[in-house]
């Protein structure tokens, strides 16, 4: 199966368990891998037969910036379900990274990655 990778999408959202996460918000980075049959699109050089990643970006942006959940696991699941519903993909991999989470003396990031397939 062919793949489209959309990496490094950066958004500002209010997801988390702590009140300051919901009030102040924080940065999230989202990476997607979309699996689909891209052969006909490639042969015909036609975007209408492929997946418009600008449209995928807008769907992800809406989910990250306009909703609020406690877990990044839930955010990843919501993104996966929206992508599966709105685009002709057979499988989507979603990685959500919380940059600089509010953990004392921790200066890295945390992330989750899920894979979801279209139901037959």
Image: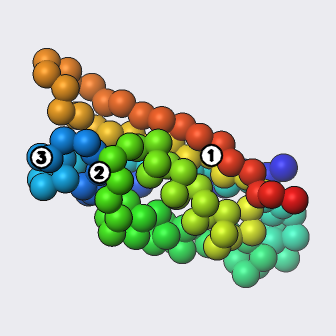
Bin the neighbour count of mark 2 within 10 Å (Cα to Cα): few under 14, some 14-19, many 20 and up.
Answer: many
Residue 3 drawn above or below residue 17: below
Instruction: Please state the horizontal and vertical placement of residue 78, each as a whole percent of the image.
Output: 51, 57
Q: Which of pointers 2 and 1 lies earlier in the amino acid sequence?
A: 2
- On the image, numbered disc 1 is attached to which residue? 93
Mark 1 to mark 3 CA distance (whole Å): 29 Å
Q: Nearer the viewer, residue 23 or 95?
A: 23
Q: Nearer the viewer, residue 104 or 61?
A: 104
**Is the C-beta separation of discs 2 and 1 under 8 Å?**
no
Q: Which of pointers 1 and 3 lies earlier in the amino acid sequence?
A: 3
Q: Which of pointers 2 and 3 lies earlier in the amino acid sequence?
A: 2
Instruction: Please state the horizontal and vertical placement of residue 38, each as a whole percent of the image.
Output: 81, 63
Foreground mark, 1 or 3, reads: 3
Bin the neighbour count of mark 1 within 10 Å (Cα to Cα): few under 14, some 14-19, many 20 and up.
Answer: some
Q: Nearer the viewer, residue 11 or 39?
A: 11
- On the image, numbered disc 3 is attached to which residue? 20
Instruction: Please state the horizontal and vertical placement of residue 35, each as a whole percent of the image.
Output: 74, 53
Circle 3 SS class:
helix
Q: Is residue 51 left or right of residue 55?
A: right
- Determine which quarter of the picture holds residue 43: bottom right
**Is the C-beta separation of discs 2 and 3 under 8 Å?**
no
**Is the C-beta separation of discs 1 and 3 under 8 Å?**
no
Mark 2 to mark 1 CA distance (whole Å): 20 Å
Residue at figure coordinates x 73%, y 81% from the top left: 48
Residue 21 drawn above or below residue 49: above
Number of numbered labels in the structure image: 3
Q: How is the image coloured?
A: rainbow
Q: Nearer the viewer, residue 7 or 104?
A: 104
Residue 39 appears in the figure: yes
- On the image, numbered disc 2 is attached to which residue? 15
Q: Is residue 114 left or right of residue 97?
A: right
């Amino acid at each position: 199966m062919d793949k489209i990778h959309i990496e490094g999408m950066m958004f500002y959202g209010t997801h988390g368990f702590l009140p300051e996460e919901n009030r102040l918000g924080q940065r999230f980075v989202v990476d997607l891998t979309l699996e689909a049959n891209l052969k006909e699109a490639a042969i015909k050089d036609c975007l209408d037969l492929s997946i418009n990643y600008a449209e995928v970006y807008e769907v992800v942006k809406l989910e990250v910036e306009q909703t609020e959940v406690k877990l990044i696991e839930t955010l990843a699941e919501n993104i996966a379900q929206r992508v599966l519903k709105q685009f002709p993909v057979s499988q989507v991999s979603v990685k959500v990274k919380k940059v600089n989470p509010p953990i004392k003396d921790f200066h890295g990031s945390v992330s989750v990655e899920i894979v979801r397939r279209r139901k037959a």
